Image: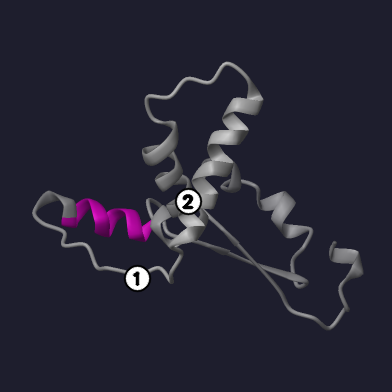
Amino acid sequence: MLADQPQDKEIHVVLDNYSPHKGNEDWLAKFEGRVQFHFTPTSASWLNQIEIVFSLLQRKTLNGSSFKTKDQLREAIEAFIRKHNEHAKPFRWRKREVKGSQLQNTIINLRN
């Protein structure tokens, strides 16, 4: 909680550029000076590690699946996590090659 932090401590919050975070100048301004907000570029979910894990969960467990109860869903998610953690290792960042019109779109997105 913000009130529990020492007054001289710098607090940095990283947010993605999901639309609810945009256009909230009034809400952000009330923390001005105490909290610094940093926004990731638009279309850069790959910078957020949890987005990568969610993507793996979706592709390996959720796509094409049907769960009759929340407990079944929870069990599937927990099984994915257990299996994933058996071979956990540091994530290796790779640079994606961007060609043609993708390059222009990538540059436009990074400017937003």
Of 5 and 27, the residue lying toward us: 5
Residue 52 position in % (x across, y down)? 43, 53
Q: Which mark is residue 79?
A: none
Residue 88 position in % (x across, y down)? 46, 64
**Amino acid carrying mark 1 in the image:** Arg
In this image, 32 relative to 3: left or right?
left
- Against 44, residue 36 (above or below) is below
Please name the residue shown 24% across and 68% down the image. 95
Please name the residue shown 56% across and 47% down the image. 22
**Amino acid carrying mark 2 in the image:** Lys
Please name the residue shown 53% across and 21% down the image. 67
Of 63 and 84, the residue lying toward us: 84
In the picture as drawn, the residue positioned furthest to the right comes out as 4
**Predominant SS of the magenta segment:** helix
Q: Which residue is identified by label 1?
A: 92
Among the 4 quarters of the image, the one containing residue 30:
bottom right
